């Protein structure tokens, strides 16, 4: 298919799809284990760029500058998602305090997620 062609052009105009409503809040239940998988995904996403590039994007976001590159926009989307999950988890009592030594042990337990 030619990339300049809109795929919707080939569909019957009466075909219906479910489309997200912009101002509706979507509650998505997920386990802590799944959130850890998202954290591993975040680590992978960030590892595709040099640290200086990631810091520059974080600075751009913190300063409220317009994000124009696809990677910047995608990273901001992911960070926003993870921040919302973190906030919701804390509000729901789904987090716990752990010592650094315990966190290191739990990271080793989840290292199989990225392999």
Image (cartoon, helix red, strand yellow):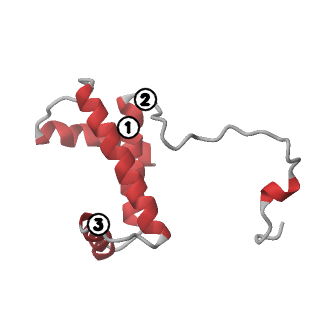
Q: Which mark is residue 54?
A: none
Which sits in the foreground, 40 or 19?
A: 19
Of labels 1 and 3, earlier in sequence is: 1
Q: Residue at x 76, y 70 (%)?
A: 3
State which quadrant residue 61 falls in. bottom left
Q: Secondary structure at mark 1?
A: helix
Question: Residue 56 in the image: x percent, y percent?
Answer: 29, 74
Query: On the image, numbered disc 1 is attached to which residue?
Result: 35
Say if residue 39 shows up in the picture: no
Disc 1 to disc 2: CB gap under 8 Å? yes
Q: Secondary structure at mark 2?
A: loop
Of labels 1 and 2, earlier in sequence is: 2
Q: Residue at x 43, y 29 (%)?
A: 30
Query: On the image, numbered disc 3 is attached to which residue?
Result: 64
Question: Please, is residue 60 above or below residue 32 in the view?
Answer: below
Question: Residue 18 in the image: x percent, y percent?
Answer: 68, 37
Q: Secondary structure at mark 3?
A: loop
- In the picture as drawn, the residue positioned furthest to the top comes out as 93
């Amino acid at each position: 298919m030619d990339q300049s062609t809109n795929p919707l052009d080939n569909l019957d105009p009466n075909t219906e799809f479910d489309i997200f409503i912009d101002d509706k809040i979507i509650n998505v239940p997920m386990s802590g284990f799944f959130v850890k998988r998202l954290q591993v995904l975040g680590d992978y996403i960030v590892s595709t760029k040099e640290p200086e590039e990631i810091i520059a994007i974080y600075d751009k976001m913190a300063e409220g500058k317009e994000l124009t590159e696809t990677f910047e926009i995608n990273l901001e989307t992911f960070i926003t998602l993870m921040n919302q999950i973190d906030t919701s988890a804390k509000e729901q009592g789904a987090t716990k305090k752990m010592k650094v030594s315990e966190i290191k042990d739990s990271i080793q337990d989840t290292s199989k997620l990225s392999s």
